[in-house]
Image: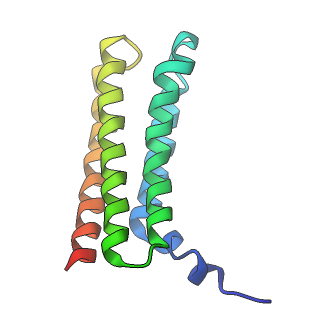
């Protein structure tokens, strides 16, 4: 049986999905520099939250309605907020500089705007 991959996994063509994947890569680059003592604490939490953004976009895209999909985009936004909070904590404990955190926050703001706009379009 042959099926169209792009149709089956439609989330892969969404710009916001691609942007979220780039954001995860950006966050991961910074997380690699965290001290080993944070590996199972802050690093793990930060990466789980970042990955959750991408995963919620994918999971929501296969829901039965746009309203359900919008709920998963809201979950992705909540995970984005968690990443931002983790970055604030990382500055507090010396794992990130203020400049590094601000670079992540700039990317986070862009992704948040895209997620919000996409969510709004689904609910119109």
36 to the left or right of 122: right
Q: Position of residue 46 (x, y in %)?
A: 45, 32
Instruction: State the residue at coordinates (49%, 71%).
Output: 11
**Left or right: residue 14 compared with residue 99:** right
Identify which residue, 51 or 28, lies in the foreground.
51
User: Is the image coloured rainbow, by chain, by secondary structure, or in one colour?
Assistant: rainbow
Q: Quadrant of the rendered structure where residue 67 is? A: bottom left
- Percent from the top left, x then y, of residue 8? 60, 80
Q: At 37% from the left edge and 69% from the top edge, which residue is drawn?
A: 69
Q: Residue 106, relative to residue 12: is it above or below?
A: above
Left or right of residue 4, residue 92 in this image? left
Residue drawn at x 28%, y 22% as measured from the top left:
98
Vertical side of 109 occupied by 60: above or below: below
Give x and y (percent) for residue 84: 30, 35
| Quarter the N terminus occupies | bottom right
Determine whether 52 is above or below 36 in the image: below
How far across and how far down the image is residue 18, in percent? Answer: 47, 61
At x 36%, y 36%, the residue is 83
- Number of labels in the image equals 0
93, 60: nearer the viewer: 60
Quarter of the C terminus within the rendering:
bottom left
Using the image as rendered, state which of residue 36 and residue 22 is in the foreground. 36
Image-based side of 32 in relation to 112, left or right: right
């Amino acid at each position: 049986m042959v099926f169209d991959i792009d149709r089956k996994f439609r989330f892969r063509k969404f710009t916001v999905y691609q942007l979220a994947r780039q954001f995860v890569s950006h966050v991961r680059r910074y997380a690699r520099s965290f001290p080993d003592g944070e590996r199972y604490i802050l690093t793990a939490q930060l990466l789980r939250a970042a990955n959750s953004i991408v995963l919620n976009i994918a999971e929501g895209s296969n829901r039965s309605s746009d309203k359900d999909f919008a709920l998963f985009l809201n979950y992705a936004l909540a995970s984005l907020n968690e990443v931002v909070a983790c970055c604030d904590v990382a500055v507090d404990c010396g794992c990130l500089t203020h400049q590094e955190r601000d670079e992540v926050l700039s990317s986070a703001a862009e992704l948040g705007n895209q997620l919000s706009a996409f969510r709004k379009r689904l609910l119109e």
